[in-house]
Each structure stands twice: as structure tokens, then as C-alpha cells.
Image (tube, rainbow, N blue to C red):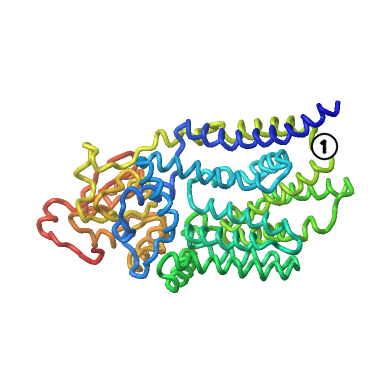
Amino acid sequence: MGMESTKNKSLVPLIVLIISIILIVFIPTKILSYGYMPSDDALRHCAKVISKKPWSEILVLRKDILIDPHIGWHKLLGLFHKITKCDIEELLIFSIVFLFTIFTVVPIFFTKRHEAYLLALFIAFIVERELLYRILFGRPFIFSMAVIMFILFLWTKYKENIPKIVYILTVLIIAIDIYIHTLSWFMHLILLSGSFLLAKEYKKAVKLGISISIGIVIAAILTTKPLYFFYQTIMLNTKCLNAELTRMLVTEFQPALGNTLLITTISILLIWSFLRKDFNIKKVYNPVFIFMGISWILGFYVVRFWIDFGVVGFLVWLIKEFEEICSKYINEDSLKRVAIAFITAFTIFLMTTSDISSRWSAPLFKIRLHKDNKNYSDWMPQDGGIIYSASMGIFYDTFYENPKANWRYVLGFEPSLMPEEDLKIYRNIQYTFGAFEAYKEWVKKLRPQDRLIIVTSKNPKDDIKELEWKEAIPNVFIGRLPKEKKQENPSNNTSNK
């Protein structure tokens, strides 16, 4: 009897751990088997690496953009590409799987009851459905989310006498994170250390703040322009939120509506703890809960505060809650742990991998512009040309499909990178809901090698008569100067050269 108990005790935690790892592996594998690929920044990150060009040769940039905002991520992808000789699609798959794995693996190192992690992940996916999609985007902010989770777990693990290794790990991981995703440094510093400060853990707040600051400085030095790093990141973070109307901002910079299911879920768990007589004020008055709460409130200003930061705090808080429950009410060697882990993991797998409404397979049917397509190849920009478009989707898709093409894009992944003159034109197009009249300032700038691309269901030929038009792919119209006008104005406008 004793031998059987000892055997169970050694095997049960291992089995639960294996179930957790299998789930982490199977989710992206199944989703990618549908043909899934993200629709935005992951495409341009991979294309940037394949192109082997600086952003100044890809985009029409402001003159004061001197540092690649994701310099570390492009170095990492470049290294992987160099070692494996992979193509752009394989590089994209690596981005998705690597970042998803980094995020989902972190809690495994900080939980003894991995079934608690699975339960928390299930609840988090239900409460904030955007979380699943975010961690499958293949974008470097996912690494930042994992780092935040790592720090919240690590710094709440010790009450006093924090080991030196904690400081070393914090400095190292922050330096890597900010080098990968430069724009988020001040949020790490203020939100993380501020949460410990508000929880009255003053010594921790100061020590964490110093550790994060050292990591940020190291990241700035790695860019080779440490002082300019701070100017550029502050400038871009300010400008990306600067638009006349909220709807003109990038979607993820717009305000959140507020997740009422979150409030309901937290309330139920707190009431349940009260009924179990396990409630104490530390359940809500702690750095993790405060971090989550602040991020939720700030989400009403910019949704990314919640979906990139607050939801991480929510997941960490859930894990701690469920681990406390599991540890108290289920024996460590109980086979109930295996049953809970298996049922929860299986449910998560079904919930996350179902191709409902073609959410994962839709990219299979996506058509992109390609410079070698015989139906419209002569309508694509010529060498040294510029694509003028008010659609970021045109940039993402066309750059991914043509990473080595010798042309530039006036609008890339962030409007604040544009020269002021072009940004003003773009904002006017947004303000007028894409009125053809608003495009005419760009029409005046067009050279023979340039193209104006408009995503619309109506042919612009009757409204923008200065150009000749072709519908290259459904609802995507390419405009160019007529041949006779090309001959009359062979060097029309050089302002964006």
C-alpha cells in the first residue's frame, strides 16, 4: 500500500506536467495546420528580415527615425534565418510557435500544481477571448507579455531577502525585452514598480525599479544610440496617440469598452473564497491584483494597457488562486489531479483549435499583390517607386509577398513614422472616411514609377480622373499616371525621394 502511494506521488505531478506541455505543443500545431497566418505586424517583421534592408529603404520615413523600433526581434529572426536558411513562410511559423511557447511555458516554472495553471488558462481564454488571438500573432509584444508574467511571479515569490539571482535575472530579461520591443520600456518601469509601491511593498518597489532601469539602459546601449533611444521612443509613443478623432487611431490604440465578464469572474472567485472562509485582504491588496486593476482602468484610455498588460496580471492572479485551492483540497498524489488536468486541457484544446467561422483557415483564401503576376505586373510600382495607400493591410500583405521589391511604402506599420506632409494627407483621408477627393494631394505627388493603391468597392476612375486605374485583385485598385502624362512629366515631384 505504501509503495503504491509513493509511486502515485512520484508519477502524478509528472503526468500533469506532461499533459500541460502536450497542450502547449498541440494548440499552435493544430491551428497552423489550417493554414493560419497573422494579418499584420508578424508579416512585416519576417519580410524585413528577408529583405535585408533598413526601414529607410522600405518606408518613406520621418527624418528623425534612426533606430529600428524592434531591432532585437529582427536580429533574432535574422539569426534564425541565417542558421536554418528558412523561407519567409517558415520564418513566420517560427515567430508564431516561438512566442506562443514562451508565453505559455512561463507559468510552468512557477507553479507546483500545473492543473491550477490549466484551470486558470481556461478561465482566462473564456473571460478575455482576445488573449488567444494576441498570443498567436507572432509579434514581439508577446515576449513582453511573457516577461511581465515572469517578473510578477518572480518578485511575488519572495517576501524578504530576495536572492541576488532575482536581480540579475530581472536586469537580463528586461534588457532583452526592451531590445526586442523598444517602445514599452516606460510601461514596464512605471506599471510594475508602481504596483509594488501601491501595495506598500516599498523596498521591493525601489529594488525592482532600479533593476528594470538598469535593464532599460543596457537595452538602450545595445541600440548603439542610447540617448537618442529615449528621445525616439518617447516621441513615437506620443505621436502614435495623436489623432483628431479616436477612430483615426490604430485599432489597438483605441479605448477598451470594459470587460464586464472580468468583474463578474473576479467577484465570483472572491465570494467563493469568502464562503470557504479562505478570504483575506491580501487576495486583492497585492502587486499582481493592483497591476491588473491599474491596467484595466488604463484600458479605457488605450486598450493595449489591458490586452497586453492587465490580462497577464489576471492570468497570474488566477493561477495563484487556483493553486491555493488545489493545494488545500486535493492531495498532491491524488489521481483527481490527472483527471482535472486532462479534462481541462482537452476542453482548452477543443475551444482554441476549432475553426469556427474560418477564424484560422481564412488566410488560405487571402489574395495579395505580387509583382510577377502577369495580370497586372506592369501596374505594380517601378524601380525606386513609392506605393501611396491609406491601407496598412496593403503594406503588410504586399511587403510580405514582395520583400525584395525595389519600392517603398508611404504608409507602413505606424502612421507616426510618416513625414508630416504625408501624415496630414493620410489623416484627412481617415477623417473623410476615405473620400476620393482626399487622395488628390497624393495624386499631385505621383511620379511615373509611383502607384496609388486604394481599397474600395467602387472604381475610382470617375473621381480621380488624373490617373488610369486597374482592379488588380478584388476591391484593390491600382492608379498610375497615364502614359502621355508620363512622357510630359518624366520627373514629376521628387519630394519623397
Residue 282 lies in what quarter of the image? Answer: bottom right
Residue 393 visible? The answer is: no
Could you tell me residue 185's position as x and y percent?
54, 64
Residue 488 lies in what quarter of the image? Answer: bottom left
Q: Which of 133 and 52 is in front in this view?
A: 52
- At a point 58% along the width and 55% down the height, the residue shown is 147
- At a point 21% along the width and 42% down the height, the residue shown is 377
Could you tell me residue 317's position as x and y percent?
71, 51
- At a point 33% along the width and 63% down the height, the residue shown is 61
The residue identified by callout 1 is 331
Q: Which of 473 and 370 is in front in this view?
A: 370
Residue 108 visible? The answer is: yes
Name the amino acid type tagged 1.
Asn
- At a point 68% along the width and 51% down the height, the residue shown is 314
- Numbered circles on residues, count: 1
Determine whether 117 is above or below 295 in the image: above
Could you tell me residue 300's position as x and y percent?
61, 60
